[in-house]
Amino acid sequence: MIHETAIVASSATIGKNVSIGPWTIIGEHVEIGDDCDIASHVVIKGPTVLGASNKIYQFSTVGDDTPDLKYKGERTRLVIGNNNTIREGVTIHRGTVQDEGLTSIGSDNLFMAYAHIGHDCVVGDHIVMTNNAAISGHVHVGDWAILSGFAAVHQYVHLGAHCFVGPAAFIYHDVPAYVTVAGNPAEPRTINREGLKRRGFSTDQISLANKAFKILYRRGLQLSEALNLISDLGDDPIITMFIDSLNSSTRGVIR
């Protein structure tokens, strides 16, 4: 159902069983998948592709131009997967041609009130961004990461899968997989043990993760030395995930 006061551009494509609330604006070149529920006073601008079964709450702005001063009106995109919940006042910007021209968001994510996702971000699946958490441009967020309220992430930072960012933390450097960071500036504290447990990792795997963390953060080693010792822990997927997140770091690993 599309409310009579909603404004839907002629070039927009609306899927089946979509609800669009009063005073909502759906702009040019927006594609909305089946079973989406879009509340009142939402603005969606394009080019934006929204998958199926997404729920967007009032006063969110999705797919607008980036305020990046390098942006000069080029045609860029936002692509969002399925089953995401975008709460009140969330802002999500499209990409820039200085990167891939694309902001990409996966599926099954929860973006709570007033969270912000900047231009050219790559956001995975099953991520929680709590109220007022914000990621700057070009940030990559791995699956199952959690950002607590008022956490702020510097541009180009990579957050590894299953990591946990504490409240009001400021992140300058890359966070490895399943590491918990907190403080301002943020520092590594421990592994996200509870998160790993909830997601089905075994006791042995969590023990391996803890050993890898201690090698990296408790022995005073250079990163290359730590990587060699972590590799000796074996090829369990939890070790591989940790090593991959270290090797893919572009801004330097948080230490």
Image (cartoon, rainbow, N blue to C red):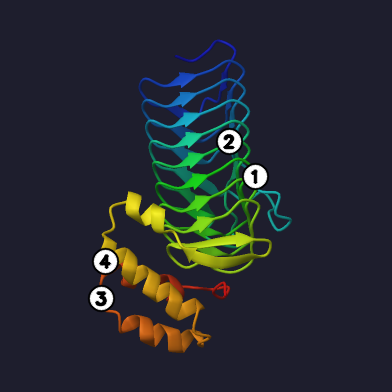
- Label 2 to label 3: alpha-carbon separation: 45 Å
The residue singled out by tag 3 in the image is 235
Determine which quarter of the picture holds residue 225: bottom left
Q: Which of marks 4 and 2 is in front?
A: 4
Residue kind at label 1, given as amino acid type: Asp
Quarter of the picture containing the N terminus is: top left
Depicted 140 relative to depicted 39: above or below? below
Q: Is mark 4 on a helix, strand or loop?
A: helix
Q: Answer left or right for 45 relative to 37.
A: right
Residue 214 image position (x, y, % from top left): 44, 76
Give amino acid for label 3: Asp
- Asked whether disc 4 touches disc 2, contact meaning CB atoms under 8 Å apart, the reply is no
Residue occupied by mark 4: 204
Q: Nearer the viewer, residue 81 or 113?
A: 113
Nearest to viewer (mark 3 / mark 1): 3
Mark 2 nearby-residue class (10 Å; few <14, some 14–19, many ≥20) = many
